[in-house]
Amino acid sequence: MKEQIIVMGGGIIGLSCALELQRRGYQAVVVETQRCGGQASGAAAGMLAPYSENVEGPDAFFQLCRDSLLLYPQWQQTVRELSGLSFEYTDSGSLYVAYHAADLLALEGRLLWQRTHGSTGEIIEGSALRQMEPLLTKEAIAALYTPEESHIYAPHYVSALERACVGLGVHIFDSLERLEILKWQETAVVRAADGRTFEGDQLLVCSGAWAQHLAETFHMHIPVYPIRGQICAYEAAAKPVKHMVFCNQGYLVGKANGTLVCGASEDVAGYDTTVTDKGIGRLRNWNKQLFPFLSQQTPFHSWAGLRPATQDGFPLIGPAPDTNRVVLAVGHYRNGILLSPATALLAADLIANKQQQAYGGAFAADRFN
Ligand code: FAD
Ligand code: GLY
């Protein structure tokens, strides 16, 4: 009989792990309190941008992001084939804009180490920059162009991932409202609010920003906190922005469906996903500085999601202490969409063999104990 793995949480991390486990011959059972993809994963801008999101240096987190980017072409193709659904996956490349000489110096420093780690990036200035992004503000003096970066349309992608899981035989139970862990040391048993129980050989925790609530259960520190990201979209059928464009305030991404997505705030609001005038107002202020044509426009849609942030900025991907039945894969903060394929491979390896060797143990789930 197949070993059964209970996956708690049906966001992009839980679904990706379930897909990989099922491919490796396990029976994955996803249990989701609400709706698969209904939280951070469905709210994301979908950028696959390890270079623009990691500006300090090539630490273990950058390596994980980069490894995951390299997995994406094949991984998303598998999701496409298994699901039979289409979703946007665009090789747009990115531009990280500098307004001042000091910003440019920082971009040049970043380019130096990033070129030794897979980037073929370059600094673009003057008319070459205007040619790449004709509507960019004249106040931008240069930009770091990274052709390797791409993006997906996250809500469609997560739906396809869910369909791919089902197609492969993953069992998915959603709208369970509340899940109580009854057993996790000798076997894994969870009970839903309606009394249904789910039993497995192991438990994989992928509950994103909600993972901290399990700290007491597993007798461990799980410093994962919700950081709200408020984000909005403009109608932009003529595709006025060609690349993902970053500045030190945020980013803009033109989507194939004719929208221009602009993100995102980072504020602390508990588990509140309300959008505020202040949050969206701030985005609009720097937006129109970057792309002056936006001062004539109003976003037609705004929303928010809860990023699972951790105390040290690294995810927790590893076994819980004192048991060989529980693995955690949580805390992907700003990069969970990008990190989903690499996390799925790591988590499946850990389910098979609890040794935490990859990336020098940098993501060990018990490192805060
Ligand atoms: P979630 O998607 O939040 O999924 C966790 C799931 O667990 C939820 O569905 C929840 O209902 C469920 N759950 C909670 N408690 C339980 C329980 N006890 N039992 C069972 N289920 C439970 N990342 C990128 O890589 N690129 C981007 O461009 C990007 N843009 C972003 C923009 C915004 C505005 C935001 C908010 C995030 C963005 N991110 C981006 C980050 C990314 O969305 C997250 O890192 C990622 O979605 C985390 O995935 P997850 O599956 O861990 O969490
Ligand atoms: N990675 C983009 C965001 O979290 O807003």
Image (spheres, rainbow, N blue to C red):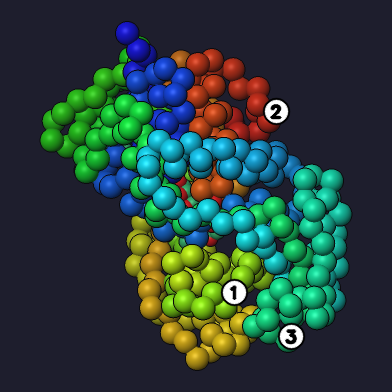
* Residue carrying label 1: 241
* Residue carrying label 3: 139
Q: Nearer the viewer, residue 140 or 240?
A: 240
Residue 261 % position (x, y) = 49, 69
Neighbor class of circle 3 (other Cα within 10 Å; few <14, some 14-19, many 20+) is few
Q: Residue at x 48, y 77 (%)?
A: 236
* Residue carrying label 2: 360
Whether label 2 lies within 8 Å of ligand 1 gets the answer: no
Mark 2 → mark 3, Cα distance in angstroms: 43 Å
Residue 89 % position (x, y) = 53, 53
Secondary structure of residue under mark 3: loop
Tag 1: amino acid: Val
Mark 2 → mark 1, Cα distance in angstroms: 40 Å
Residue 147 % position (x, y) = 71, 57
Q: Residue at x 71, y 73 (%)?
A: 132
Which image quarter is the C terminus in?
A: top right
The answer to whether residue 148 of the structure is visible from this angle is yes
Neighbor class of circle 1 (other Cα within 10 Å; few <14, some 14-19, many 20+) is some
- Tell which residue pokes out farthest to the top in this image: 1
Q: Which corner quadrant of the image does residue 173 belong to?
A: top left
